[in-house]
Image (cartoon, grey):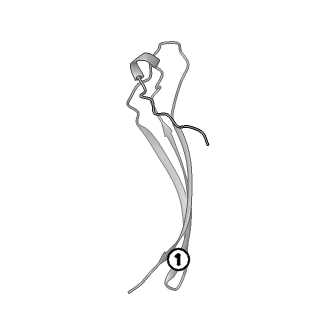
Amino acid sequence: MMEQTKADVDFNAIKLKKFDYGMKFGLGFQFGLGPVHIFAQGDYSFGLLNLNDSGTGSDIKNTVIGASAGVLLGFK
C-alpha cells in the first residue's frame, strides 16, 4: 500500500494564478417510461484565462470533460 502525503501548494513560487473563469457546454437526453426516467448527459468546460503567471509565454488553461447517466424515479 502506498503512503499518502499532504503538501501545500505555493502558487507564488510556481507562478500560477489562483483565479480562473470559463465556459461550459452540455448536451443530454431523458427518456420516460411511466414513472421511471433514464437520462444521460455530457459536458465540456474550459477556462478562459491563461493561468501561467511566469511570463514565459506558454499557456496553461483548465479543461474538463464530464459525463453522467442515471435513473429518475417519480413518486406521487
- The residue under the point 55% across, 60% down is 68
> With respect to residue 21, does 75 lie above or below?
below
* Residue 61, horizontal then vertical, whole percent: 51, 30
Residue 49: name its quadrant: top left
Assign the N terminus to one quadrant of the image: top right
Assign the C terminus to one quadrant of the image: bottom left
* Residue 72, horizontal then vertical, whole percent: 49, 74
- The residue under the point 41% across, 25% down is 17
The total of numbered circles placed on residues is 1
* Residue 12, horizontal then vertical, whole percent: 39, 18
* Residue 73, horizontal then vertical, whole percent: 47, 79
Q: Name the residue furthest top.
A: 56
- The residue under the point 48% across, 21% down is 52
Direction from residue 10 to residue 3 in the image, left or right: right
Residue matched to label 1? 37
User: Camera-side residue: 20 or 13?
Assistant: 13
Direction from residue 37 to residue 9 in the image, left or right: left
Q: Name the residue furthest right.
A: 1
User: Camera-side residue: 26 or 69?
Assistant: 69
- The residue under the point 53% across, 26% down is 60
> With respect to residue 2, does 60 lie above or below?
above
* Identity, as a three-letter code, of the amino acid under mark 1: His
Mark 1, residues whose alpha carbon is within 10 Å: few (<14), some, or many (≥20)? Answer: some
> With respect to residue 69, does 20 lie above or below?
above
Secondary element under disc 1, as helix, strand or loop, is: strand
